[in-house]
Amino acid sequence: MDPLNTDLKKEQILSAANTIRWDLGMDFHDTVIESIYEDASRIARKSVKQKGDKGAYSMDLKIDRIVTSKWLGFPLMFVMLAVVFWLTIAGANYPSAMLSAFLIDYLHPVLNHAAASIQMPWWLAGVLIDGAYLSMAWVISVMLPPMAIFFPLFTLLEDLGYLPRVAFNMDSLFRKAGAHGKQALSMSMGFGCNAAGVIAARVIDSPRERLIAIITNNFSLCNGRWPTQILIATIFIGSVVPAQIAGLASAGAVVFVAVLGIVFSLVVSWGLSKSVLRGEASAFSLELPPYRPPRILQTIYTSMIDRTIFVLWRAIVFAIPAGIVIWLVANIHIGDLSIAQHFIDWSNPFALVFGLNGVILLAYIIAIPANEIVIPTILMLTVLNSGLSGMGAGSGVMFELDSTADTASILHAGGWTLLTGVNLMLFSLLHNPCSTTIYTIYKETNSVKWTVISTFLPILLGLAVCFFTTQIWFMIMG
Amino acid sequence: MKIPFILEIQPGAMLIIGLLLMLLMFWIFWPKRGLLALLSKLKINNQRVHLEDALKFLFDCEYKNTICNVNSIAGNLNINMEQASRLVERLISMGLITMNDEAIRLTDTGRSNSLRVIRVHRVWEKYLADETSMAPADWHNEADRLEHFVTVEDTEKLAAQMGHPVYDPHGDPIPTIDGELPSPKGKPLNQMKAGESGVIIHIEDEPKYIYEQLVVQGLYPGMQVYVIHVIENKITFAANGEEYTFTPLFAAHLTVELLSDKAPEKQKHDLLSSLSMGEEAEIAGISPHCRGQQRRRLMDLGIVPGSLIAAEIKSASGDPVGYRVMGTTIGIRKQQAEQIFIHRKKENHYESNE
């Protein structure tokens, strides 16, 4: 056939098709979907027989009437989530201690000895063992157990069909903030791990609400930050109240920070939906699937592989280079002082305006791979900077102390006050997400713009909150 | 050690400095009115905007068979006569228009140029209406702003993404890439006679204040209208069970395609949001105000005319409500449930509840 002729025909067909489409009018897409449904339901009526469905469904309805009832809905939800968090925190202590005893207390000195026996240069041993290995070991021992408990529990609730009901109940609150009810789920997931929370935002199918959920996930106080909050609250808040209520006061302070995080998450969601995300597409619908017995083994397997190992792997990948950097800044000297000390001296005046100090700023920069290593880094840097002798494990070697009182004495020696403690707690809530989360945000949004916004927005908020806290504090304290 | 200067500032002064800094940031980043937004507006090339707007206007006159002169260009573009005549001279020198006596006509090149601008405008309007959550009254203005600096390639990519739409959200046909456009259909509402019925196929989006009022009144393309009576300076018609009375000036902004075979629907639809728990109804349709992704989603879930829907559970806070449709339960917010029309069944069968 003549190719020119076929081309001509093709043109004619296309232009004919176009003319017809104009005649079809505006709502022909609707007509197509309607006729598909009509056909489908006609076929289904002819060939599908239903039996027993009604009974099973009425059971679902009964459960739904309870878990979504006006009086029982919210209390049930809080109890359920509290149990999950309690199991996570209480259950993770023991395996964490074991992992840390093995990887840090046992294996780390063994490796150091081995390096010495093969006469490895001290700087190479420092970079590899005190830097890279220690940081990786730390991340594994503090991150793995809570995640290995939290994720399967959370996934079980999801599999059971309960979580969609939480979203259903919480939706009106999130709707007022311009967000999606399912953000309640990604937010709760964020209390376990922000990277997993960001991934969990996939369940939100509306582009605008999904972005909001991703950007604000960092305001959920993650597993890596709870220990920091508890430690600092015990040392600084607990010590200013009478001893009988010290425990209560510090626990209250930690809960206050976590609730503040939720408030920030809602307020920022509202702000985003009214400003930068105003025009983004938005759609709402929430499937309420039938309840079913959870598939326990499958759930544990998938939550371990998809969430725990996945997040842990990303954390390790970032922890190794960061460990090297941590060791190097503490050990490379320019003049008399190490790079770390130069930075701390230089940034101290600036940091003091925000009620923080140079050590904290540096720790948050170099401990970016995981919030879990912020406190060990702060301790190491404080010892390094204030030249405390007989403390710590050597420059560039992160450490933690078993006794809270010893930790407190190091921090007091570093010049910390109650104000520093309060600001650290605030800054720990409001700062950039860890590098694992940042990378995950980039992967999920595929956009540099949103990644940059999610990274710097919390820092700006954190600095602003610390600044005003500090200056008002100074005004009142005179 | 010397105390750094920054630490010597009094906390009170510091607080004021902090507040000022925050204000400054707000002023810079505030959407639409902030410094950044203003700077980006400055970048727009005014000359190109005027040229393209004039071409669009000229094509519109040609399409509607009205005469166009320098005066009407000045009026439409909101510029003075001097600017308008300079603009016309420029268009003539570019070979895009010809002028006979007073009447201005497009040349073939001018026509294909203006069709290109119109295509870009309408494709973007369609995009803004369907793929963003921008308010209906803003579609036209935003597209007016965008059409002058988006590229033809980007627009074509966008059109392909949306499945090559042929109508914009106001019911105007979108010209093809080759510049084809169907001849106008229907007639303005002010020319209809009492007893005639039809479907709104187009709502004129200029001038803006009239368009906005029509939208606020709840009129949309695809709506059935039935003219009740026409007297001098007043036309009264029914649409979706409501009665409207317009002056001919307003009515002329609605284009209606006459229906002869279909009996007009006079009954007003009930809304899904009015169902009480346990009540079942048949879906009559989804309001055209519910567009794009949200509409597709609802239809995918089985919310199509004819299917049965029942309100089942209320969330702990009262909104959203879980509806049972096609064997599954879906939570739908009140705002969306108010855009879904239903037919109530004659006898309501209540299940036991609460």
Image: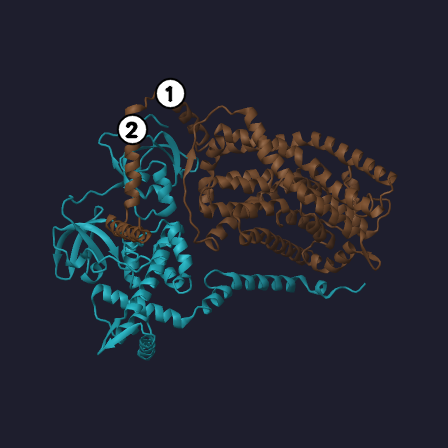
State the image coordinates of residue A72 (x, y, percent, origin top left).
Answer: 47, 30
Q: Residue furthest top?
A: A52
* Residue behind mark 1: A55
Q: Nearer the viewer, residue A191 or A413?
A: A191
Q: Tell me the subunit letter for badge 2.
A: A
Q: Secondary structure at mark 2?
A: helix
Name the residue: 14% across, 47% down.
Answer: B260
Seen in the image, is B193 located left or right of residue B209?
A: left
* Kind of residue sitting beneath label 1: Gly
* Kind of residue sitting beneath label 2: Ile
State the image coordinates of residue A144 (x, y, percent, origin top left).
Answer: 66, 34
Q: Where, by quadrant of the figure, is residue B253 drawn?
A: bottom left
Q: Residues within 10 Å of mark 1 (few under 14, many from 20)?
A: few
Drawn colour of chain A?
brown
Looking at the image, is B322 positioned above or below residue A22? Answer: above
Q: Nearer the viewer, residue A240 or A342?
A: A342
* Residue behind mark 2: A43
Name the residue: 76% across, 40% down.
Answer: A400
